[in-house]
C-alpha cells in the first residue's frame, strides 16, 4: 500500500523516476541478511536477495540507470553462486536472460539462457526451463 501512495504522489509531482529509484534503494539490499535468508532457502526454495537483485536490475534499466542495473545484475549472479544453490542459479540465469534480451545484448542473453537451461534441465526445474527456452528462442 505504501508503494502505491509513493507512486501516486510521485506521478502527481512529476517526479516518478526519482520516486521509483528511491523505492528500489529503500526496500532491497538494506534488509537482506545472507546468513538468515540462506537458512530460509529450504522453506521457500528461492533466496530473496537473488530475486530482488534480478528484478531490481530490470527496474533500474527501465528507469535509465543502465550502469547501476549492470552492477545489480552482477551482484545477483555473485550471490547465486555464493549460495551454491542450483535452483537460485537457474532462477538468476533465466531472469538475466530476459534482462539481457531487454537490453538487446543477444550474446549475453543466449549465454544466460544456456546456463539456465543446463542447470534447470539437470535438476528438473520446469519453470526455469520454460523461461530460458523462451529467451533462447
Image (tube, helix red, strand yellow):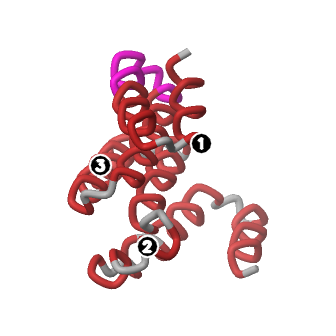
Query: What SS does tag 2 mark?
Result: helix
- What secondary structure is the magenta-colored segment mainly? helix
| Residue at (46% x, 68% y) in the render | 48
Residue highlighted by disc 1: 127
Residue drawn 50% across and 45% down?
Answer: 58
For the magenta stretch, what is the residue range? 101-111
Looking at the image, tell me whether mark 2 or mark 3 is earlier in sequence order: 2
Residue 35, quarter of the rendered image: bottom left
* Residue that carries the numbered disc 2 in the rendered image: 42
Percent x, y of residue 70: 33, 43
- Front residue (pair 61, 18): 61
Q: Is residue 24 left or right of residue 16?
A: left
Dot 3: element: helix
Left or right, 83 with respect to 44, comes to: left
Instruction: Residue 62: give x, y in percent of width and height.
Output: 55, 42
122 inside magenta stretch: no
| Residue plotted at (48% across, 36% down) | 99
**Which numbered disc covers residue 77?**
3
Amino acid at each position: 500500500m505504501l508503494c502505491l501512495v509513493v507512486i501516486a504522489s510521485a506521478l502527481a509531482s512529476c517526479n516518478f523516476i526519482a520516486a521509483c529509484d528511491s523505492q528500489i534503494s529503500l526496500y532491497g539490499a538494506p534488509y537482506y541478511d545472507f546468513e538468515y535468508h540462506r537458512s530460509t532457502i529450504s522453506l521457500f526454495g528461492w533466496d530473496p536477495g537473488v530475486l530482488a537483485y534480478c528484478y531490481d536490475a530490470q527496474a533500474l534499466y527501465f528507469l535509465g540507470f543502465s550502469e547501476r542495473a549492470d552492477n545489480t545484475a552482477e551482484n545477483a549472479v555473485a550471490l547465486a553462486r555464493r549460495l551454491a544453490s542450483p535452483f537460485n542459479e537457474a532462477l538468476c540465469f533465466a531472469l538475466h536472460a530476459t534482462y539481457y534480451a531487454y537490453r538487446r545484448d543477444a550474446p549475453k542473453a543466449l549465454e544466460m539462457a544456456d546456463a539456465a537451461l543446463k542447470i534447470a534441465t539437470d535438476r528438473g526445474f520446469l519453470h526455469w526451463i520454460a523461461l530460458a527456452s523462451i529467451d533462447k528462442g
